[in-house]
Image (tube, helix red, strand yellow):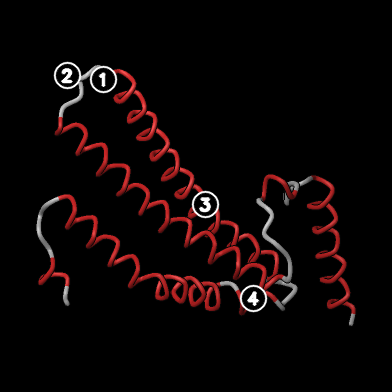
Amino acid sequence: MSMNETYRDDPDSRLANMEMVLDESETNMVNGINSLIDNIITPFIDNEDWSRIAQWNFDSIYGSFYRHNEMCNSSLDKTKEATRQAVRDDVGTEITKGKLSSLIFRNKVQSLNCRRSALIVDALETKYKEIFGKSYVPVAKRGSVTDKVYVNQAEKNMMVEELKKLIA
């Protein structure tokens, strides 16, 4: 059944369609992430002149999707807290059927969105492990790549290599 055949503009139908699209897209999403990394990062990994840049590029891609996943989860947490507050404050007349319906819908939609964003992050982490042979460690926990000692040593190594080429 195509989406046009099943779409109705009511909360249950919208949720069902969102879930259907997500279910049908999961494999393509993972394949897309793998293709992105295979074409943007992997070709440069084995070249020592490009490997650090490839790592930085991966960090940029991962970081943006990781942050998006965090924001999705934060939004869901806020909705859950608003739901708890509404239920806690209700003594029988404060919370309307419309508000209940809205809170149910928001919780379910945001849960689907969190599932989608987590799938992307998980695919990136799996691909990282496949490429680099180790689990991904966020940049902040790795230490700075612009650390003074590292940069000075890298600059020195580059100059030595350039001089060797000049005198060869």
Q: Nearer the viewer, mark 2 or mark 4?
A: 2
How many numbered discs, if any?
A: 4
Q: Which residue is mark 4?
A: 44
Q: Is residue 132 left or right of residue 148?
A: left
Relative image position of residue 99 (x, y in whole percent): 19, 31
User: Cβ–Cβ below 8 Å for labels 3 and 2?
Assistant: no
The reply, left or right, for residue 145 in relation to residue 37 is right
Q: Amino acid at mark 2?
A: Thr
Disc on res. 132: none
| Amino acid bearing label 1 | Asp
Q: Quadrant of residue 117?
A: bottom left
Give the distance between the C-alpha atoms of the residues marked 2 and 4, in whole angstroms.
63 Å
Amino acid residing under circle 3 = Tyr
CA gap between label 3 and label 4 equals 23 Å
Residue underneath mark 2? 93
Are the two marked residues, 1 and 2, in contact with CB atoms closer than 8 angstroms? yes
